[in-house]
Amino acid sequence: MKEKNYPPEDKHLGNFQVLVDIIARLRSPEGCPWDRQQTHLSIRDSLLEETYEVLQALDNNDPPSLQEELGDLLLQILLHAQIASDNGHFDISDVISTISKKLIRRHPHVFGDGKASGVSEVLANWEEIKKTERKDRASMLDGVPPAMPALAYSQAIQKRAARVGFDWDKDSGVVEKIAEEAREIAEAASSLEKEQEFGDLLFTLANLARRQGIDLESALRGANQKFYRRFSTMERLCHERKTGLAEMNYEKQNDLWEEAKKMVE
């Protein structure tokens, strides 16, 4: 027999606690068999997938999609919290309490007697506060998850190092370093050396992007999507003209590429 007032009325669906209760019900003995059998590890990939879908909505500047994708990401967070609660570890209120305390602790210039005249001073204070939180961690870089995508991880650790002044004085120095790394790729004698030099080049490019306020993952996703649009346009043109890309020589393929570039961004 269904409980009274379940499912909730539409007017209550914007209430955070209602969503928490819905997920708890899905995980209950009377809930959904699929939801009941999930673990932190079984839905790990879903958390990553939903995160990337949020990023795509942001890249596309699509507020309706962003609204939906943020909801899907929130679902993953609440599922993990409910699984933890079912296992007696913590619940969503503990998660919220932890982040609330952290935000208050790291913003003494807002919630306490601290002073910060600008962004640079805020970041300096932030790093000092985090230093006291690290406790047994040997490095200020240890808090960056190594499982992050390599380009994003590179920018994150360089950003942390820059907070304590370990950074280039000028962008021109980074540009010169990029040219140096490119030369070293050409001079590398083995495949292993080339791989190492490519890594150094990408690391330096990530540094320049960070200094100029560019998120390299977003920039590369945009370049990938642009290539996809243009290449798929080339394929469509070939289909319309009853020919194939593999049948063309380099010059004809390049001409078709230039045509596609004029048709799509």
Image (cartoon, helix red, strand yellow):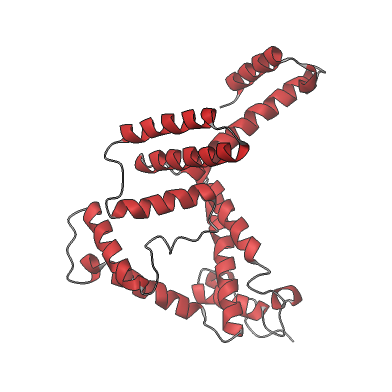
For residue 151, above or below residue 67: above
Classify the position of the C terminus by image quarter. Answer: top right
Left or right placement of residue 6 versus residue 182 in this view: right
Q: Is residue 216 visible?
A: yes
Left or right placement of residue 214 versus residue 34 in this view: left
Q: Position of residue 138 (x, y in %)?
A: 39, 67
Q: Residue 48 occupies which quadrant of the picture? A: bottom right
Classify the position of the N terminus by image quarter. Answer: bottom right
226, 18: nearer the viewer: 226
Residue at left offset 53%, top offset 28%: 186
Q: Position of residue 94 (x, y in %)?
A: 46, 80
For residue 158, above or below residue 128: above
254, 157: nearer the viewer: 157
Q: Residue 230 occupies which quadrant of the picture? A: top right
Residue at left offset 34%, top offset 53%: 161
For residue 143, above or below residue 189: below
Q: Position of residue 128 (x, y in %)?
A: 27, 65
What number of labels is visible? Answer: 0
Residue at left offset 36%, top offset 39%: 212
For residue 13, above or below residue 153: below
Q: Residue furthest front?
A: 189
79, 176: nearer the viewer: 176
Q: Position of residue 165 (x, y in %)?
A: 27, 51
Q: Residue 38 occupies which quadrant of the picture? A: bottom right
Residue at left offset 51%, top offset 68%: 14
Q: Is residue 61 visible?
A: no
